Amino acid sequence: MDADATEPIRQRVLAAAGRGSPVRIIGGSTKQFYGREVPGEPLNMAAHRGIIAYDPAELVLTARAGTPLAQIEATLSQSGQCMPFEPPHFGSTATLGGAIACGIAGPARAYAGAAKDFVLGVTLMNGEGQSLRFGGQVMKNVAGYDVARTVVGSLGSLGLLMDVSMKVMPRAPQSATRVFELGAQAALRQMSEWAQQPSCISATCWVDGRLFVRLSGSDAAIQTAAARMGGEAHAAGGEFWSAVREQSHAFFGGAEELIRVAVPALCAPQTFSGECLMEWGGSQRWLRNRSDIEAVRAAARSAGGFATRFRTRDRSGDVFEPVPAAQMRLQKTLKAVFDPRAIFNRGRLHAEL
């Protein structure tokens, strides 16, 4: 049931701040694995839910943080619209607040944009129980430091996301998937070549010696692109992309350690040994069952990228790439401004935060 739980949440925040006690922010509990271990009592946002405003003509939707992603997607679908960055759910209870706080995008990320590219404004409750509004409901309503987009991917370290206004987009009328039998290096070269040409590619994924390419747009555009590119039609394309997005694909099964690597698209495949799945034209790579995170990070940095321990049994160390001292000072300053008693998701992003 839709409800505004601002006041009960505010009282919980004020009580925690008064005691100096940390709290763990929880939405649908589908992404609790992501980031470092967090101390404190749970502060559940799931009851703060509901779509506040939706204007299909203006392509803008505002919803409370605890609103299920499934509810938002169903509402958008009725108007032929979608969240272009395809946020993964990782479970049926996934919420909008969790998707924005984690900032994780799906297969379309390299072609449609990241989560932060579609966030227009947020309401954030700070560590003193104050509700602060940043941004707005139009793209041009941005002045000074862009706090609304800074919140994306901050894992709740700055405050409680109360509601989010975001840009939505028309859903592509048609989609089709082509499959190519290619080695990793050949797949990277082919994706690079396509990236330099006009196309209707909306997702790419290489795994187990096969390159999958999703084409989205009008039927005529898809047929023209498919004829030019070649490959074989993949009848279960929709299921494949859903499995990659939700990490239910066989590649992710049973992985005790899953490392996400972000590198330039043409980074050589041999830079990272072992089992690999490549997305986003080659710029996102998943490595499974690798325990040598420091070696992976060193290789990623040499290539101009970084590595994240996306799923790991050991969440006590650096899950995310350590940041330079100057950047950490900035992040600590922001944390002090919004959460002076450090009660929100203490240490989840970095130990110092």
Image: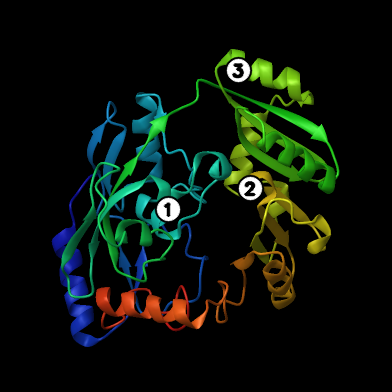
The percent coordinates of residue 290 (x first, y second) are: 74, 69
Name the side, left or right, on which 296 lies relative to 97: right
Where in the figure is residue 122, as x and y percent of width and height? Answer: 27, 54
110 to 292, vertically: above or below: above
The quadrant where residue 322 appears: bottom right
Task: Say above or below: 301 vs 68.
Answer: below
Q: Residue at x 41, y 52 (%)?
A: 116
- Residue tagged 2: 248
At label 3, the amino acid type is Ala
Which mark is on residue 99?
1
Residue 88: image location, x then y, percent:
51, 48
Image: 129 above or below 153: below
Q: Earlier in the sequence, mark 1 or mark 3?
A: 1
Q: Hey, what amino acid is under mark 1?
A: Ala
Q: Quadrant of the N terminus?
A: top left
Q: Residues within 10 Å of mark 1 (few under 14, many from 20)?
A: many
95 to the left or right of 91 = left
Compute the Cα span from label 2 to label 1: 18 Å
Residue 245 visible from this viewpoint: yes
Q: Which one is earlier in the sequence, the residue at label 2 or at label 1?
A: 1
What SS does tag 3 mark?
Answer: helix
Which mark, by number, is residue 221? 3
Question: Badge 2: how crowded within 10 Å, few (<14), some, or many (20+)?
Answer: some
**Mark number for residue 14?**
none
Secondary structure beneath disc 2?
Answer: loop
Q: Residue at x 36, y 79 (%)?
A: 40
Q: Quadrant of residue 28?
A: bottom left
Task: Determine whether, in the image, residue 101 is placed left or right of residue 87.
Answer: left
Mark 1 vs mark 3, foreground winner is 3
Instruction: State the colouring used for the structure image.
Output: rainbow
